[in-house]
Amino acid sequence: MVTISGDVLNLLIASWVFPFVRIMAMLSTAPIYDQRSLPIQVRIGLSAIIAFLLAQTLPQPVPINDPMTVAIIAQQILIGVALGFSMKIVFAAFQFAGDIIGLQMGLAFAQFVDPEKGSVSPLIGSFLTILASLIFLSMEGHLMLIDAVTKSFDVVPIGSPSSGVTFENIVISGGMLFMLGLQIALPIVGALLVANLVLGILTKASPQMNLMSVGFSLTIAMGVLVLSFSVPYMVSTFSEALTRIASVAILRAQ
């Protein structure tokens, strides 16, 4: 009969638990995987399977009863959360761009209840978020996330010293969100600004025409038209941003 000592059992458990915690933290914060429609059992099962497969290739970790266990688990959570949020920046930028576009189109009042978020969301922002999700899946972004978290164990091994999520990284991520959001919204906002300027000049030149009565409809129509022509540009922008963020996501987790 084969017997396993307590120390060996602790090492076996540790070799699976630490990767599981990092992967689970990433899946709980990453786009697509964090949806309410995806049961928690699926995330747990997927994390357990990936952790089991990775445990065969990772260096031997510290025992589960080591005094540093709590600190190592906290480190794995921080790394996983950093990886997930790095990918989510692009989605937040699309939501931000949609809010700006909707405001300029006069659709700030057009909102609906989002069952995923459990709150009210602007119409254009929700549309761009759905568009970003479709692009993300078409680029196999859900597989890119799994690849990023597996490669993170080579960059930041379990128990190795790391600087964690620094304030500088948070500021850089926030700046990238606003920069990307403005980059997406700028063409449409610029076209709507020109349209509003022309309507204002015509109203001043011919007050009897009462262009403001039809200006609202014209602004919405102009916005929808420019938005439809801007979709290919948004797709390329999303692809470039996602590729750039994916390439540095692991380094940000250090």
Image (cartoon, rainbow, N blue to C red):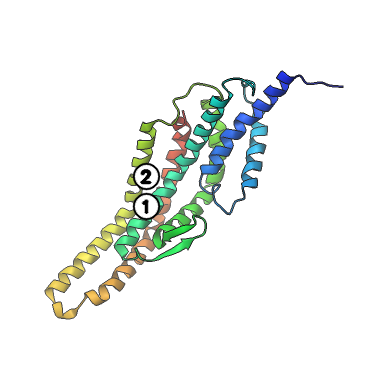
**Looking at the picture, which amino acid does disc 1 mark?**
Phe
Residue 152, compared with residue 1, is above or below; it is below
**In this figure, which residue is indicated by the disc labeled 2?**
177
Q: Residue at x 14, y 77 (%)?
A: 207
Label 1 neighbourhood size at 10 Å, few (<14), some (14-19), many (20+)?
many
Q: Position of residue 83 (x, y in %)?
A: 49, 37
**Looking at the picture, which amino acid does disc 2 mark?**
Leu
Q: Position of residue 143 (x, y in %)?
A: 57, 43
Count the labels in the image.
2
Question: Rounded to the nearest whole Å, what is the CA distance between mark 1 and mark 2?
Answer: 8 Å
Q: Where is residue 67 in the image (x, y as percent from the top left)?
A: 58, 20
Residue 44, compared with residue 210, is above or below; it is above
Q: Where is residue 24 in the image (x, y as percent from the top left)?
A: 58, 38
Q: Residue at x 61, y 20 (%)?
A: 66
Q: Which residue is drawn at 45% across and 28% down?
A: 164
Q: Which residue is drawn at 33% across and 41% down?
A: 175
Q: Which of 1 and 225 is in front in this view?
A: 1
